[in-house]
Amino acid sequence: MMTSIRSSRLVGPVSVGLAMIMTLVLMIPAGSLPTAEAAARRSRLLLFPVLDRTEAPVEDVAARATAYFQVALNEIDMFQVMEFSRTSPLVMRAVEEGRIRAVDLEIEVADPATAIELGHALDADKVGLIAIDGLDIDDDPMRVEALINGQIFDVDDNFDPETLEVVEDPRPTSTFGVAGRSRVREGYDSNEAPLIREALRDAAQRAASVLEGEPPVPVEERVEPRRDGAWKWIAGAVLLTGLIVALDSNGNDVEAPDPEAIAPRPLPLRQETAAIRLRWEPPVTDLDLLGYDLQRSTDHGRTWNPVPDSPGNVLPGHTEFADFNVEPGISYAYRIRAQYAARGPSAWVRFGAIEFRP
């Protein structure tokens, strides 16, 4: 179903008003927002590693899917996601206190009873079981579709406090089945791994929409703006807000780097048939790494903008990213920084520049 923006005399003033409100919100210190209260309303969701029921050509497809789902589910208001892994501080503490066994970290959690039992031991409100049931790869044109199913179980509803056992027939509170798709790549003849990751990321975002109660928008469906006065007002408001967010596009970030936040080490850029691939060595540090920021410049470093599709999608375990949004004959310069939980960002470090010649 196509969506349009209706014309109204109030659209202009309202749009400008919204832009002004967003400006004020951006100027409010983060500590003054009611984040603690919002977090308290969220259900603590224990997310188990995504199960790979396919013979995917990428070895770490399940790990990447787990990371994408953790990010996507954390971004919706209903969940505060906790990771079940041997490196999670929550899980490590539970092992030390004897609430769960070390052997539990060696098994693949695939059944609701085990998941709910571990969720109860870790004081979770809900547990999530997700599986990749199919990966369809088309060669001409190249595209990938990931079929993913998941179930969310309420721990208290499925755990008997008297017997301290999981009920005989656990019932999920939410289920979903989504198909994540990569964009179609005409003439692409390189490795399919980037397209698989794109499909997995799309599936995670669609699953989050389903769990919020909104059916995912089909890939083929596109929302076309109406060419009327209302659209001009909205576009102006969005542009104004964007200019406020990017106060200084010359690299003078509002968020100053922490001297103890170690930056990654860029490796030489590599040109592929339809993309420029960025690769780097991760920083050697004991700090809690949240992920990476990637930016590029097309004017020899005078201005910088985020690499398309990269914001929020370059996770701690990643050591490469493919920029498909490139045009022949244009020289692209890139830079990267690391984001840490307690320290903030590292300094930006440059990859260099490369002219894209397919």
Image: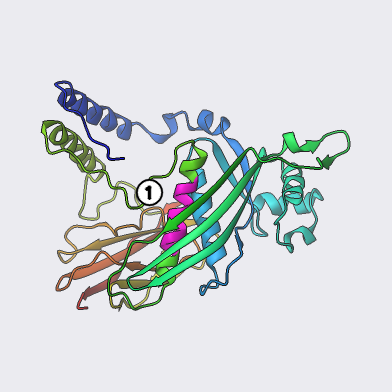
Q: Nearer the viewer, residue 357 or 230?
A: 230
Q: Is residue 287 visible?
A: no
* Rendered view: 87 above or below 14: below
Outermost residue toward the top?
A: 10
Q: Residue at x 16, y 67 (%)?
A: 300
- The amino acid type found where label 1 is placed reads Pro
Outermost residue toward the front?
A: 1
Element marked by disc 1:
loop
Q: Nearer the viewer, residue 21 or 271?
A: 271
Asked if residue 97 lies left or right of residue 334, the reply is right
Badge 1: residue crowd in 10 Å (few <14, some 14–19, many ≥20): few
Instruction: Tell whether position 202 is magenta.
Output: yes
Quadrant of res 330: bottom left
Is the magenta region chiefly helix, strand or loop? Answer: helix
Q: Residue at x 88, y 37 (%)?
A: 163
Asked if residue 150 lies left or right of residue 91, the reply is left
Residue 273 x/y as whole percent: 28, 78
Asked if residue 14 lies left or right of residue 136, the reply is left
Residue 118 x/y as whole percent: 74, 48
Asked if residue 130 lies left or right of residue 166, the reply is left
Q: Which residues are magenta?
A: 197-207
Q: Is residue 87 visible?
A: yes
Q: Residue at x 43, y 30 (%)?
A: 33
* Rendered view: 66 above or below 356: above
Q: Quadrant of the C terminus?
A: bottom left
Q: Quadrant of the N terminus?
A: top left
* Rendered view: 68 above or below 349: above
Look at mark 1 in the image and give the residue it sits on: 218
Residue 89 x/y as whole percent: 65, 52
